Image (cartoon, helix red, strand yellow):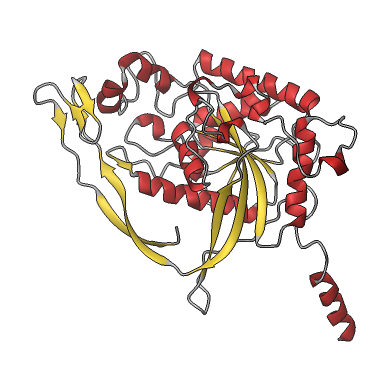
Amino acid sequence: MLAASIVTLLSLSSTCMGWEWGRSGKWDYKPKASCHSETSTINYTTISGFFQQDDPATVSSNFDYTESNYGLIDRSYPTDNKFDPHGKRTQWERFAYYVNTLNRDCDKNTQYKVLFMARHGEGYHNAAESYYGTPAWNCYWGPLDGNGTVVWRDAQLTNAGIAQCTKANTFWKHALSTEKIPAPQSYYSSPLIRSATTANLTFNGLKLPAESPFVPTVKELFREGISMRSCDERSSKTYIRTLLPAFRFEEGFTEDDELWKGYEGETSEAELKRTRTVLNDVFSNDDSTWISITSHSGQIAADLKVLGHIPFSLSTGQAIPALIKAVSLKAVPATTTIQSWTAEATCKAPPVTSISGQGCVCSGASSTTLAAAIATPTTSVI
């Protein structure tokens, strides 16, 4: 009994209360109330000052991560004197060492992760919206499967989109071999074909560490904001597995898309709640420090908002990294009521225009009336 007590005391009094070197740790998070009516929640903070994309002065519209070392800022770190006293290490090597010390030295309620969040390459739906214009796309063309020549339901990549992926693959080859960027330890993908294909074309064939191979996990909630447009309906699990047999699926991934409705869209509040759920899942159950997530512009915008990052829009094929501090907290659960779905008006013919907040302006009597939105009460800690 005495020996057991001594072992316990030594383990608790260690000078290092953090995580294994190179790992951020995990919490096995369960959103379950305790006997004191408290529940665990995760507080996210983006630690700025490390990437150009977290600098408000950076213009997102013309920024290209492949031409700027993924945006990593050329700067010193508090650990440089110990790790690189002679100045021979690359910027990424020094940054990686610094991040690993953050996880080593933090308490067990805190972890740090670096997320590589990439938007898919151009899909046929992107090309169609550019061709027809956003008003006509949102109200008429988008809900269709295609235009008789091109199909954009769960859109595939265009040739331009494939070229963007090839560019990303070339960047990673150089970054891994020359800049010594840490290879992702885990890979996640949206279930939509354009994103899964982008992840595959970006990372397949790279010289990756044996302990961190490219074996991505498809997660349902990393999908694009769910509109009534057909590009947001995912294909079946069987089809995805046939197209990308190396991909794994998270537990509980359904055969068919049970979220896309086709007659109403997800509200921004519901998307943020969904995003927090999937990020909580990753931070709680994956002890990787370096994580790749391939998804969509709207989904990444939601990720950034939940993570406390400044807004930063991404063109197709672009990406953004972020150093995230996550702290597991006890919090009193709050009951909030959000509107999960909202009706989206469409036109029976190409519209005259669309007005923000009001929907389509159809020509004549060509509008289609949709069901009213439903407000869904939910209990959550935001």
Quadrant (top left/top right/bottom left/bottom right) for the C terminus: bottom left
> Which sits in the foreground, 233 or 119?
119
**Residue 359 at x, y percent in the picture:** 22, 32
**Residue 291 at x, y percent in the picture:** 65, 41
Q: State which quadrant residue 155 falls in.
A: top left
**Residue 243 at x, y percent in the picture:** 57, 29
Which residue is farthest left?
364
In the rendered view, would you say 123 is above or below 38? above
Q: Can residue 242 be spotted in the picture? A: no
Q: Can residue 113 be spotted in the picture? A: yes
> Which sits in the foreground, 261 or 273?
273
Q: Is residue 171 left or right of residue 178?
A: left
Q: Is residue 92 left or right of residue 225?
A: right
Q: Is residue 69 left or right of residue 52?
A: right
Rendered residue at 37%/48% (across/down): 269
> Which sits in the foreground, 175 or 121?
175
Q: Is residue 36 left or right of residue 151?
A: right
Rendered residue at 27%/44% (across/down): 342
**Residue 292 at x, y percent in the picture:** 63, 37
Which residue is farthest bottom?
1
Total numbered labels placed on residues in the image: 0
Quadrant (top left/top right/bottom left/bottom right) for the N terminus: bottom right
Rendered residue at 71%/51% (across/down): 24
Rendered residue at 64%/19% (across/down): 67
